[in-house]
């Protein structure tokens, strides 16, 4: 997995990642969609402090605008019982892929990383179907857990049992190869500038994040769950800043702002690794982790100031 795709997977929610998978499959430059991915650290930290969940979830800003210009046709089919999904996917065209909502803990094709809660909703990307007599299989590309290959379609169907009514649908994706791909770079650039002008970045919120790490069990139920959650948070932040950098590069920009963003990504991933190590060893992070967070806060402030001064003044 290349660094850009890894950061997209860290930043975007699973359904949005599925859309990007389909676009990447056809060579679409997904960095062009990253014009509004700057996340205010204060909003992220308030989410961390108050959400009361043990699995990282956050509604990212990216991929929320009108994307009708993107050559991706999306057709939605609703179903009543999971068995109907098998019949629908048998009719899927070779040029299509399908997205399904499943319960993540019921997928049996790979070992899950970290902690897993019951009824964890997950979007599954199916890009091929194979049916020979009783052998019915889906070819999937999953990132959580990471897996590419054929799986038993009936096992996937079983992971959809008791699905909430609002999630009982399939989305069929088809890349429009015949649609001229025209990038209105000026429009995308103006959207980026407007997003940066509207954005704030309260870097003092980093201290609040460190304070949250003190009451591990009270907030998250266990030390391991806390480490897992915090490592995902820092993955998300690294993804946000890296994708800003990739958008600027795609637009043809270079210079110190990109260096500042890259420095922040480096710091954020070091902190992510601190929590991953803590999860493996069972030892709480020490003051060196807080020093890293202060360095990350300084790097983030520097990068944001440069974004404002260089592009959105």
Image (spheres, rainbow, N blue to C red):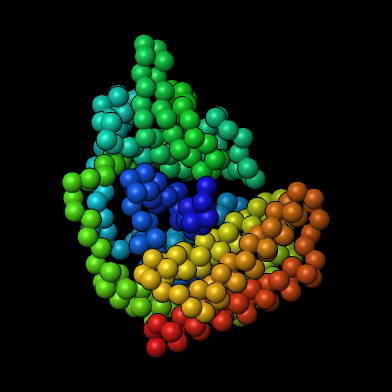
Q: Quadrant of residue 75?
A: top left
Q: Foreground residue, 54 or 197? A: 197
Q: Quadrant of residue 229?
A: bottom right
In the rendered image, the quadrant that contains the C terminus is bottom left
Q: Is residue 297 visible?
A: yes
Residue that appears at 44% across and 62% down = 60
Q: Position of residue 70 (x, y in %)?
A: 26, 55
Residue 182 percent coordinates (x, y): 22, 60
In this rendering, would 62 be left or right of 228? Answer: left
Q: Position of residue 214 (x, y in %)?
A: 74, 66
Q: Is residue 73 left or right of residue 266?
A: left
The residue at 48%/56% (across/down) is 4
Picture residue at 56% right of the left edge, 55% below the top: 56
Image x and y of residue 267, in percent: 64, 68
Q: Is residue 167 left or right of residue 71?
A: right
- Please tell me which residue lies in front, 259 or 71: 259
At horizontal 38% and vertical 71% (from top left) the residue drawn is 252
């Amino acid at each position: 997995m290349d660094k850009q795709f890894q950061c997209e997977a860290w930043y975007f929610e699973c359904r949005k990642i599925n859309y990007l998978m389909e676009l990447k499959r056809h060579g679409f430059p997904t960095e062009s969609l990253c014009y509004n991915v700057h996340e205010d650290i204060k909003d992220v930290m308030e989410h961390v402090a108050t959400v009361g969940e043990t699995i990282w979830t956050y509604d990212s800003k990216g991929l929320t605008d009108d994307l009708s210009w993107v050559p991706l046709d999306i057709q939605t089919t609703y179903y009543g019982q999971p068995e109907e999904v098998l019949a629908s996917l048998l009719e899927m065209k070779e040029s299509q892929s399908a997205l399904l909502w499943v319960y993540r803990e019921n997928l049996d094709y790979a070992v899950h990383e970290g902690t897993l809660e019951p009824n964890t909703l997950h979007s599954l990307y199916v890009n091929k179907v194979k049916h020979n007599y009783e052998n019915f299989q889906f070819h999937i590309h999953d990132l959580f857990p990471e897996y590419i290959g054929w799986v038993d379609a009936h096992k996937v169907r079983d992971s959809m049992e008791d699905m909430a009514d609002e999630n009982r649908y399939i989305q069929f994706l088809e890349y429009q190869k015949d649609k001229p791909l025209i990038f209105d770079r000026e429009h995308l650039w103006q959207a980026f500038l407007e997003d940066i002008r509207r954005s704030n970045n309260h870097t003092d919120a980093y201290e609040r994040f460190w304070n949250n790490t003190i009451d591990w069990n009270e907030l998250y139920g266990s030390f391991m769950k806390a480490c897992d959650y915090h490592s995902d948070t820092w993955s998300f932040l690294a993804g946000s800043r890296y994708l800003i950098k990739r958008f600027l590069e795609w637009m043809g920009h270079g210079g110190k702002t990109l260096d500042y963003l890259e420095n922040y990504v480096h710091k954020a991933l070091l902190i992510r690794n601190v929590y991953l190590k803590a999860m493996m060893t069972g030892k709480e992070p020490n003051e060196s982790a807080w020093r890293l967070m202060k360095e990350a806060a300084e790097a983030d402030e520097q990068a944001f100031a440069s974004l404002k001064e260089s592009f959105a003044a």
